[in-house]
Image: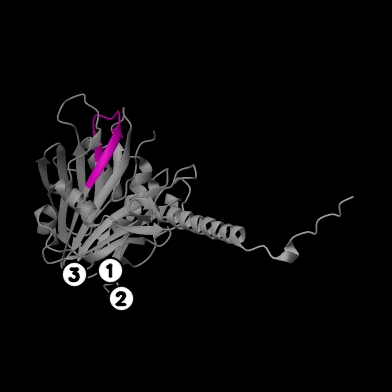
Amino acid sequence: MAPAYACGCGAMVPDASGRISVSDERSVLRWDGRQEQIVMRLTVAGDAEHAAWIMPVPHRAAVRLGDPALFDQLAGATAPVHRTRYHFWPQEGEWPFDGHDTAAGAPLPGSGTTGVGVVGRQRLGPFDVARLTATDPAALQDWLHDHGFSLPSRLRTALEPYVDRHWEYVAVRLAPDTRDTPLHGALDPLHLTFAAGRPVYPMRLSRLAATPQSLGLYVLAAHRMETSGTIGGPRPEVAFAGRLDAPGGALGKLAAGTPYLTALTQSFPDPARISGDHELRRAAADTPVRQVVHDDELRRIAGIPAWSLTVGGALAAVVAVGALIAVRLSRRPISPKDVSPSAPLG
């Protein structure tokens, strides 16, 4: 397992003695036209006792813990609908055929170094969060190193575009509550809020990943949203699009004022081709999209397969017709010409 120098929306780096991988990442982005919120939950595995996660943001961010129930609600709201599709003739897996049939579906610190400013620092559960500004990528790297974040040199190069655009950073030191316990499983969600004239989902650091990456992003806005480009992968697919109907709970609070939910998925077979961050825009129309799973069932009548009743009925009809013909033939009068003349007596 290689060090996770990148994940979908930032960079994940373990301590010098450990390794870590991000096995799952789920994020929801909310944009109301002036402010953006990103809630993300990472599931990690490995033997690292501490790790650093760095996320660039275009403006100063407020950070708090998110509600884990949010992602369960999102999964339920976007789940495919099941529709039964009946067929007349038996398929593989149904008597009298052997086999198996599957239904097909349509489917995450103080300061002092020159060039770095500490906006704030806080403790959130197992997270030690620092919010930074930086004008020099080398100074940013030095500051992070001085405070327990050992970053690979290639990450410093990857951060340069953000430094050039005067973005800020959320630097999070992840550590379990129990000392000497490796980071493992689903971490508490983090909830970031910052000003944004247009919605953006940071992806540039994912180009450092050594293995193919995938993006699963929920977007809450006033209308259906789409990405403005592909940034090095195939065009994102829309897994769900539609207005939420008073969901309540954590999702209801986050979706207030932004009731339209768009779920996007995208794969990156070659992460090195990722060219930037995902910028989002309003789609041409608020056309709803929902995946449908067809559950194929054999049509039955009173619990009996319709095909067997039809075939059985047809066979019975053939037998009945045959029997009727036989009966009629057996009852037909014998005419003199059908009787052979008797042989002469000798």
Q: Of the residues tagged 1 and 3, which is closer to the observer? A: 1
Q: 165 or 341: nearer the eye?
A: 341
- Residue highlighted by disc 2: 284
Q: Magenta residues?
A: 41-52
User: Is residue 311 within the magenta segment?
Assistant: no
Which amino acid type is shown beneath numbered disc 3? Ala
- Residue 51 lies within the magenta run: yes
Circle 3 SS class: loop
Tag nearer the camera, 1 or 2: 1
Q: Is residue 290 left or right of residue 336?
A: left
**Residue 61 picture location, percent across and down:** 15, 55
Residue closest to the eye, 88 or 257: 88
Work out whether mark 3 precedes mark 2 in sequence or the reverse, and give the earlier one: 3
Task: Indicate the amino acid at tag 1.
Answer: Pro
- Residue 258 in sight here: yes
Cα distance in 3D space between marks 1 and 3: 14 Å
Residue at the image point whose x is 26% and y is 40% from the top? 43
